[in-house]
């Protein structure tokens, strides 16, 4: 490695050995071993070939293989895995990645240049597009793509505004901030096959309470791979129910101001579904219109624990 590492890219993984292999390949194609960064794979109790995949990449890199680290986190849950990654990282900055991404050729350099140019920066997020490995269903509209990790605020470097925040598959932090605000909420987030969420929104809420600026990096660009297992009605339903359940957990001890602000936002999303659905109906795409309403209804059911 050419310089003292400043960034640890943390990949939390659970039973995705094939995807993890291709994710590591894409990062190696970015020549990360000649960059001031490390890779840390946090295995959250995988029962597949995950350890062998990491070992293969380490061995094939020879002396540079030391830039890839592997640990196992036995507490089940994405938040536990992320927290373990933070504790194990020895660099001043950490960037979280999903285990099923493809990095573009500007990805690593964008994160490097950002933290070097803005050493005081606390948090940032990058662009994510969806790569469909199987045919896209006719009910999957553009407005549901964020469920699959899609996150694109344009091609201009900027600060996040309002209630917007980075997505978990491509987000970075100054490590020291976790000593001040705490780690990820372990009652939130995915656990094994559970599709609960909300841990990222809850963490960024704590950052916003401190008036922390959060930056959007368009050139820190990755693709999130999605196959047929995530393109079923049952999967989307479980994801929506999980969002509702996570919302309930986040708001249990929230102030009345935060509670009502959250529901104003949710009500606005419901209202916006009507004109969007009308556009799809007028363009003879009833499946997309119907799914918009079903999705909002499933979130409400999850919130009310009517599962």
Image (spheres, helix red, strand yellow):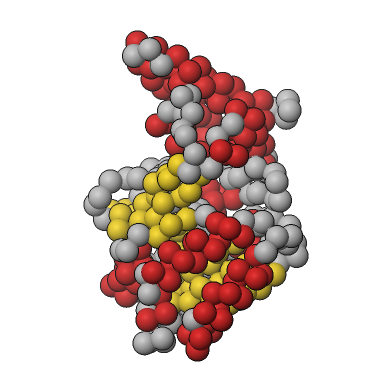
Query: Vertical placement of 73 versus 276: above or below?
Result: below
Residue in front for this viewpoint, 248 or 93: 93
18 relative to 268 in the view: left or right: right
Where residue 167 sits: x, y (%)?
47, 50
Give the residue drawn at x 54%, y 63%: 21
* Image quarter in which the N terminus is found: bottom left
Q: Is residue 122 left or right of residue 45?
A: left
Q: Residue 80 placed where, x, y %? A: 67, 61
**Spot occupied by residue 214 in the image (x, y as percentages of width and height):** 38, 56
Number of marks: 0
Instruction: In this rendered view, identify the residue nearer to me: 251 or 275.
Output: 275
Would residue 199 be visible to someone looking at this image? yes
Q: Residue 211: name its quadrant.
A: bottom left
The residue sitting at 31% across, 63% down in the picture is 106
* Residue 249 image-quadrant placement: top right
- 114 up-or-down from 211: above or below: below
Q: Quadrant of the C terminus?
A: top right
Q: Look at 46% across and 24% down and name the residue there.
A: 138
Q: Position of residue 37 (x, y in %)?
A: 43, 77
Viewer-proximal residue among 62 and 183? 62
Q: Residue at x 65, y 37 (%)?
A: 242
Q: Is residue 215 visible?
A: no
Residue toward you, 26 or 3:
26
């Amino acid at each position: 490695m050419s310089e003292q590492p400043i960034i640890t890219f943390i990949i939390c993984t659970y039973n995705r050995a094939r995807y993890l292999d291709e994710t590591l390949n894409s990062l190696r194609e970015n020549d990360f071993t000649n960059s001031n960064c490390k890779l840390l794979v946090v295995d959250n109790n995988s029962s597949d070939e995950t350890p062998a995949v990491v070992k293969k990449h380490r061995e094939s890199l020879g002396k540079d293989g030391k830039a890839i680290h592997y640990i196992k986190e036995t507490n089940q849950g994405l938040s536990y895995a992320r927290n373990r990654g933070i504790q194990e990282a020895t660099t001043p900055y950490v960037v979280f990645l999903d285990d099923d991404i493809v990095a573009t050729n500007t990805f690593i350099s964008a994160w490097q240049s950002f933290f070097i140019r803005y050493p005081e920066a606390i948090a940032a997020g990058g662009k994510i597009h969806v790569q469909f490995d199987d045919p896209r269903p006719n009910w999957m509209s553009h407005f549901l793509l964020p469920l699959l990790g899609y996150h694109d605020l344009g091609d201009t470097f900027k600060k996040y505004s309002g209630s917007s925040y980075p997505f978990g598959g491509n987000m970075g932090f100054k490590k020291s901030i976790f000593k001040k605000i705490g780690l990820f909420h372990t009652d939130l987030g995915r656990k094994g096959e559970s599709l609960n969420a909300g841990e990222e929104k809850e963490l960024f809420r704590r950052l916003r309470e401190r008036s922390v600026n959060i930056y959007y990096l368009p050139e820190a660009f990755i693709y999130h791979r999605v196959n047929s297992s995530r393109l079923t009605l049952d999967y989307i339903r479980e994801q929506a129910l999980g969002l509702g359940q996570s919302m309930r957990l986040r708001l249990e001890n929230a102030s009345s101001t935060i509670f009502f602000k959250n529901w104003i936002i949710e009500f606005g999303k419901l209202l916006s579904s009507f004109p969007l659905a009308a556009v799809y109906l007028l363009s003879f795409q009833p499946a997309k219109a119907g799914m918009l309403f079903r999705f909002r209804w499933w979130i409400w059911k999850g919130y009310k624990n009517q599962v």
